[in-house]
Image (spheres, rainbow, N blue to C red):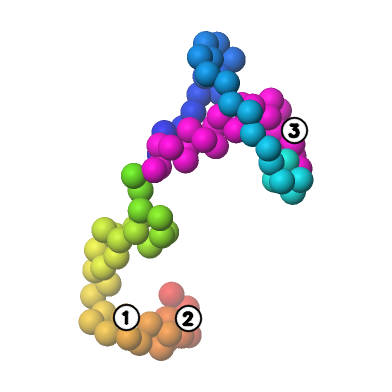
Amino acid sequence: MHRFDDHAFSDAHMDSQLTLRLPADMAAKLESAARRMKRKRSDVVRLALGQFLEGDDAPGRPVERVRDLIGSVQSGIPDLGSRHREHLIARLRRGQ
């Protein structure tokens, strides 16, 4: 995911304006995030919206983000998936 430049919005020319209403709890979280990040609320909203739109083509469930990694690591233990707890306990007992 692209990381937004800290100064990307301060120098950018804004062509469009959006007004929205937020529930009180969301507004409080936005205010808190803005203070924590030392940014304007509008900058925080732009960052969040930009990240959301960039990731729009990413599948919705977290497992979809790592699906290509599942099963890609070879442990050398053929029954690790079905007996992972037993293998973990044995390894802990051996001190590895």
> Can the viewer see residue 94 in this picture?
no
Callout 1: helix, strand or loop? loop
Q: Main secondary structure of the magenta part?
A: helix
Residue 78 image position (x, y, % from top left) = 23, 82
Residue 42 image position (x, y, % from top left) = 64, 27
**Residue placed under numbered mark 1 in the picture:** 81
The residue that appears at 64% across and 34% down in the rendered structure is: 20
Q: Which residues are magenta?
A: 28-56
> Can the viewer see residue 26 in this picture?
yes
Q: Are marks 2 and 1 in contact (CB under 8 Å)?
A: no
Callout 3: helix, strand or loop? helix
Q: Name the N-terminal-most of marks 2 and 1.
A: 1
5 is higher (above) or lower (below) than 66: above
The residue that appears at 24% across and 63% down in the rendered structure is: 72
Name the disc covering residue 73, or none.
none
Amino acid type at circle 3 is Arg
| Quadrant in the picture for the C terminus | bottom left
| Quadrant in the picture for the N terminus | top left
Callout 2: helix, strand or loop? helix
Q: CA distance from mark 2 to mark 3?
A: 44 Å
